[in-house]
Image: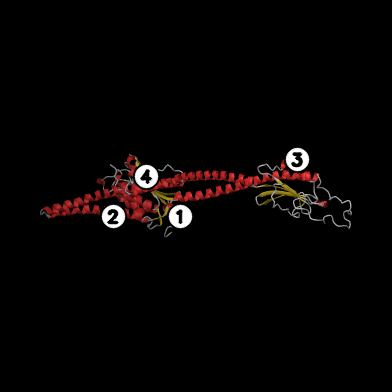
Amino acid sequence: MKFRQSIRWRIQAWHGALLLAVIAGFCATTYRLQESNALRQADVELDVRLSTLTGLLGHRGMQGPPPRRPDGPPPGGNGPPDDQGPPPREGGPPRGPDRGPPVETFNAPEIASLFNPRAEAPFYFCVWSRKGPLLAKSEWAPDDVWRPKSGEKTSLTKMTRDRENFREMYAFTPPGECLLVGQTRAPIEREMRDFAWKLGGIGAGVFAIGLAGGWLLASRAIRPISEISIAASRIAAGNLAERIHTSETESELGHLATVLDETFQRLDAAFAEQARFTSDAAHELRTPVSIILGQTQLALARERGTEEYRAMIEACQRAAKRMHGLIESLLQLSVLDAARQALDRRPCDLAELGREHLEMMRPLADEHHIALEADLAPAPCAADAGGISQVLVNLLTNAVKYSRSGDKIRVATHRENGCAIISVTDTGPGIAPEHLPHLFERFYRADVSRNRTTGGAGLGLAICKSIAEAHGGKLTVESTPNVGSSFTLRIPAGMEGPLALPGE
């Protein structure tokens, strides 16, 4: 069944089973306690009557040894024992020395008030002699009452027993007589039936309320799942701007919904960036392709001289080189995006790389009358030296390209908080604040500092950022117009303590 696979139904089934077990255990315990209390109350009533009966009968003739016959030998003599006579008649008073109390004792007002036959559940009594015959009993006492065994308990110890549908209490006097009082259990059973119905009704009500509360709690708990499912379905249908926006933000599922919202937002941004990237790449490739097509059409339109053909071929060559460079940059970005963990990480020192590239860029800087400065403290790390070199070449080339005559470019390296850091700072015109958040986007050009007149397709800094992120690092920029710009590359050192470089 489908509902068996539902998380809500599973939670509800477990909650219902647990609640039912708890309610059943509580009701059973309460029923037993109530039953014990009812029996205890009944035993109190029996004890009052048994104590009264014992006191009356003991006071009126059931204490002390049996009376001595006038014509018989004294007790303990050689004569026949007192209890060897004809057996007493069943239900009547015994004859001889084991006669027991006189009959009028059982008609005493005290006993008549305690054993009222007209009561709803009348009490009854039975009295047996020390030898076993029944001395007396109530007229309404059951016929199948049997005498308890005297050897079970000592004298004057009151014991209770359940016999069929009766509750009885008995005791033995010191001489050995047995007194028993009892009452039918019908009132107790009727009371317990009524209590069981009430208890069952209360338990059923609590169970129903518990199920309703559990259903509400389960529904509220898994509500984010439904919202996530609906939002995911809409996103899968192409609505990338869809969000979950759940109100349950503090629960575990609420946190999951928040994480998924952030994931969907990043996916939306990634798809939007991919679409923009494709559009920009097509736009960048369209220009050199248009140049090549235009030049070839002109060349084929009519016969031309050697110099004209040469100029057209050179224009096509320049357009092709531009297109080739753009394609190479796109391929490099795609490789960095697809395999960021495939870097050839080896021990290197950013200070050595910085010094090497400063010397390499010095002729170009001298040509533009730009001074190069170095502050290269050891900054060992594990990195792809080729990728880091590409970042440095790009940053230094941009710094020279956009600096003015007489400006300075400074390269500095150091280690800080487990990272190797290299920065390229210039005193050029700087970058406007509105361009800084978009400076590392693909094909982005600032209006003044980055445009086609100075060359480039707007992919250099995007490639630098991808290389930094592939190393688990970060490339940041700080710039103030008319003061200068500073690009900082941070790379996790990947080791503790100084790094032993090859050959040292």
Can residue 33 be seen from the camera position used here?
A: no
> On the image, numbered disc 1 is attached to which residue?
495
Q: CA distance from mark 2 to mark 3?
A: 123 Å
Q: Quadrant of the N terminus?
A: bottom left
* Viewer-side residue, 354 vs 45: 45
Q: Nearer the viewer, mark 3 or mark 4?
A: 3
Identify the element where label 4 is drawn.
loop
- Residue 109: which disc? 3
Residues at circles 1 and 4 in contact by the CB criterion of under 8 Å: no
Mark 4 or mark 2: whose residue is earlier in sequence: 4
Identify the element where label 2 is drawn.
helix
**What colouring does the structure picture have?**
secondary structure
> On the image, numbered disc 4 is attached to which residue?
243
- Identify residue type, mark 3: Pro
Above/below status of 332 relative to 34? below
Q: Position of residue 58 (x, y in %)?
A: 80, 46
Q: Quadrant of the C terminus?
A: bottom left
Q: Given the current orientation, which residue lies at the most extreme bottom position? A: 503
Quarter occupied by residue 202: top right
Q: CA distance from mark 3 to mark 4?
A: 91 Å
| Residue at image coords 55%, 45% | 200
Q: Position of residue 243 (x, y in %)?
A: 37, 44
| Residue at image coords 20%, 54% | 317
Mark 1 or mark 4: whose residue is earlier in sequence: 4
- Identify residue type, mark 2: Glu
Q: Position of residue 67 (x, y in %)?
A: 85, 50
Mark 1 or mark 3: whose residue is earlier in sequence: 3
> On the image, numbered disc 2 is attached to which residue?
328
Q: Position of residue 437 (x, y in %)?
A: 34, 43
- Identify residue type, mark 4: Arg
